[in-house]
Image (cartoon, rainbow, N blue to C red):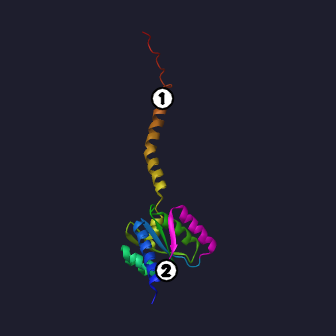
Amino acid sequence: MPSQKILESKQEIVRVLAEKLRNSTAGVLVKYEGITVEDDTKLRSALRAAGVEYCVMKNSLTGRACDEVGYGDMKQYLVGMTALALSEKDPVAPAKILKGYAEKIESFEIKAGFVDGELLDAQGVNTLAEIPSKEQLIVKMLGSLMSPLYGLAYVLQAKIDKDGGAPAEEAPAEA
């Protein structure tokens, strides 16, 4: 039977992980088997730059934390060497980054994930990864809004050019 000190340590780990899961908008569970140290270092660096926390934890502890926050169905994916990537702000970042690595490294695979409290299977995470980033969506929206304005400006400029230029400004009348 484990000592009280070890038991309390594990309970604290589960509590901290459960809190991280609660505070995250998205998370992705991956099988990280077969990844080289170099690739793992690059992966962790990319995740850190995107504000994503990546951790490797015992499946039993991760399962208990999942139970605490209502993600009990995710426990079925906690088999083998698993890691968890959590993002508090960007719901797409972990899926995008991990999908890129899963495409490059054959043994690295996406198992499952969640977004805003909804559980996703591997296909759902891959679909999420296809969504453009927030910045790309903003650029597309602004482009859509600006296009008609540019069209109007070109038409008005063509009319001015056709009529021989802008009308001359009249000098103010002296009183």
Tag 2: amino acid = Lys
Residue 64 picture location, percent across and down: 41, 79
Mark 1 neighbour density, 10 Å: few (under 14) some (14–19) many (20 or more): few
Q: Is residue 51 magenta?
A: yes
* Rendering quarter of residue 69: bottom left
Residue in the picture at 45% in, 66% down: 128
- Which residue is the site of mark 1? 160
Residue 46 picture location, percent across and down: 56, 64
Q: Is residue 4 magenta?
A: no
| Quarter of the C terminus within the rendering | top left
Q: Is residue 45 above or below residue 57?
A: above
Q: Quick check: 155 left or right of 104?
A: left
Secondary structure found at label 1: helix
How far is mark 1 from mark 2, CA to CA?
72 Å
Mark 2 neighbour density, 10 Å: few (under 14) some (14–19) many (20 or more): some
Secondary structure found at label 2: loop
* Rendering quarter of residue 10: bottom left
Q: Which mark is residue 99?
A: none
Residue 77 picture location, percent across and down: 45, 79
* Residue nearest the observer in this picture, 32 or 160: 32
Q: Quick check: 42 left or right of 99?
A: right
Q: Is residue 104 above or below residue 3?
A: above
Residue 7 showing in the rendered view: yes
- Which residue is the site of mark 2? 58
If you read the primary sequence from the N terminus, does the residue marked by circle 1 or circle 2 appear first? 2
Residue 78 showing in the rendered view: no
Residue 141 picture location, percent across and down: 44, 50
Magenta-colored span: 35-58
Tag 1: amino acid = Ile
